[in-house]
Image (cartoon, rainbow, N blue to C red):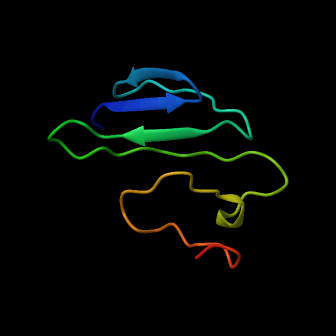
Amino acid sequence: KGMATVQVDDETFFLRQGESTFIRAGMRHRLVNEGKLPLEIIEVQLGECVDEDDIVRFDDEYGRVKKRKDEK
């Protein structure tokens, strides 16, 4: 439900209800809900590793980025 602004590497596009996209492994990507209605998505992961341990957060407005041990 809703409409998502999708950023994949240097490309930005919109997805509306019922639409989909494919994001290849290793591509930087981000979903943004710029609307007033809640955004509901279905995410399907493919491959040998399909857990949350492979996430690398480059930017995080919600405080979920954990600093590496070598960062201060």
- Outermost residue, front direction? 72
Examine the rendered structure and indicate whether residue 19 appears above or below residue 67: above
Residue 29 in percent (x, y) is at 56, 38
Q: Please indicate whether residue 13 sits to the left or right of residue 10 in the image.
A: left
Question: Extreme right residue here?
Answer: 48
Q: Quadrant location of residue 8?
A: top right
Give the residue at x 39% y 25%.
15
Q: Which residue reaches farthest left?
A: 36
Say which quadrant the C terminus sits in. bottom right
The residue shown at (44%, 24%) is 19
The part of the image, by quadrant, that contains residue 48 is: bottom right
Question: From the viewer's perspective, is 69 left or right of 62?
Answer: right
Residue 24 coordinates in the image, percent (x, y)? 71, 33
Report the number of numbered marks.
Answer: 0
Q: Nearer the viewer, residue 1 or 30?
A: 30
Residue 4: x percent and y percent? 35, 33
Q: Position of residue 53 (x, y in %)?
A: 70, 67
Residue located at (38% from left, 22% from top): 14
Viewer-closest of 16 and 30: 30
Q: Quadrant of the N terminus?
A: top left
Residue at 35% x, 46% y is: 40
